Image (tube, rainbow, N blue to C red):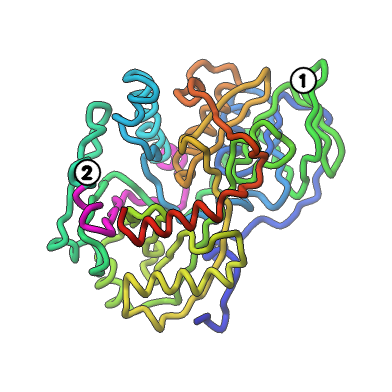
Amino acid sequence: MFTTDFKETPYWWDHAPPEPKADTTLPKQVDVAIVGSGYTGLHAAIQTAKAGRSTLVIEAEAAGYGASTRNGGQVSTSIKASLPQLTKKYGPQLAAEILGEGQASLTFIKQFIDDEKVDCDFQVVGRFHGAHTPKQYQQLANGLGVNRDVFSDDAFIVPRSDQPTELGTEAYHGGVVFPHHASLHPAKYHRGLLGIARNNGAQIVTHCRVLDLDRDISGFRLKTQMGEVRAKRVILATNGYTGPLSPWQQRRIIPIGSYIIATEELPKSVMDRLMPTDRILSDTRKLVYYYRPSPDRKRILFGGRVSLQETDPSRTGPKLHAELARLFPELAQTKISHSWSGFVGYTFDTLMHAGNDDGLYYAMGYCGSGVGMASYLGMRIGQQAADNPAGLTAFNKIPFPTRPLYFGNPWFLAPSVLAYRIRDRLGV
């Protein structure tokens, strides 16, 4: 099942490992302190530093230790709800703005990587979204173009008869292709952001957990493992790793573990047969599987949720492998080279959120679409903290819901996953 050199660390770290701990000291005071060094925090830091604000990024682990170097490297338009669904809830104008932000996130990350020349294997490859039942295929076909009053995604339907041109499996009943979606190498992308943030003057302090956050007359006082620092403004960029430091946000973020495996290297003929394109891939299940070829097209990276509760990647690895083999039976004997996990930040309304509480800024809740949206909202929240009016987003305009009796521990996760699993099996 596992290769002899099997690792319980992300495949991405083989090419861009976490930086070692460096000797550093905290400044006594800064204009902006950012908690979290993932995509959100670094993009925010780039903006505040460019605006001339002294900027400090504080990270409890190695830089990018969380989902920013653990994800599948898939870049989409991020918004799960459709225009009719959003219109029913928020009205036509705000609904259009929300969907527009999703499109803007995809445009932004493409332009940023090109402008900054970030070496991260970025490719516009498109996404194939497979229908796991005939009913789901019909729903995909009926919904094609439903958002085109806001933007054109150029999506097109792929019937089952044409599916071999997209994917070498008979497990789906056709699907839809979103040609503008993209892929990248998450850890290389994060490494590039670190360099850009530093080059613009931001200080990054790692292995320094923030223990307490208090307001004072001049702004905020952050108590950390390395001492105290005062900041005029604070940006929370913790997403799925949001904890008791910020109880209000913790009550609104649902940390959900997502698990990924990488296969051993596969023959070129097998890769070309099973994945004739470089597309990123997902499906219509409630417990969605997402997968893709590695940037060098030698492996398949396959992710999803396969357990009722959080568990060890060594346990979820074989379960993910079984699902991979269900889609591609010829991979039944293929070994796993890497198995790892990370926390994504879900919300009760499946939308991302941004806001400002008198100098305490936040952007989070990307619901599994964090590569593009964390980059985009990190940039926007950085602009907001630097008093740039361009930073205001549609996500500042909507309420950030919680639920009674929820305080950050998702006790409802196991029954919810079980219910979704049953629905997937029934095809509803």
Which residue sits furthest right?
227
Give the number of the disc on residue 155. Answer: 2
Query: Which residue is painted at 49% across and 76% down in the image?
Result: 336
Q: Residues within 10 Å of mark 2 (few under 14, many from 20)?
A: some
Label 2 SS: loop
Viewer-nearest residue: 235 or 54: 235
Give the number of the disc on residue 42. Answer: none
Provide residue 169's location: percent of width, then percent of height: 25, 69
Question: In this view of the protein, can residue 280 be seen by the observer?
Answer: no
Task: Find out whether residue 186 is within the magenta segment.
Answer: no
Provide residue 97's location: percent of width, then percent of height: 37, 23
Relative placement, left or right, of 340 versus 28 is left
Q: Is residue 304 above or below residue 314?
A: above
Viewer-nearest residue: 265 or 341: 341
Quarter-wise, where is residue 235 in the image?
A: top right
Task: Find out whether residue 118 is within the magenta segment.
Answer: yes
Q: Is residue 114 above or below residue 10?
A: above
Viewer-nearest residue: 248 or 97: 248
Bounds of the magenta segment:
112-138
Tell me which numbered mark, 2 or 1, is placed earlier along the sequence.
2
Residue linked to disc 1: 219
Relative placement, left or right, of 163 versus 418 is left
Provide residue 231's location: percent of width, then percent of height: 76, 25
Quarter-wise, where is residue 424 in the image?
A: bottom left
Provide residue 421's location: percent of width, then percent of height: 42, 59
Q: Is residue 19 above or below residue 298?
A: above
Query: Which residue is painted at 45% across and 54% down in the image?
Result: 419
- Type of residue at label 1? Gly
- Type of residue at label 2? Ala
Whether the residues at callouts 2 and 1 have beta carbons within 8 Å, the answer is no
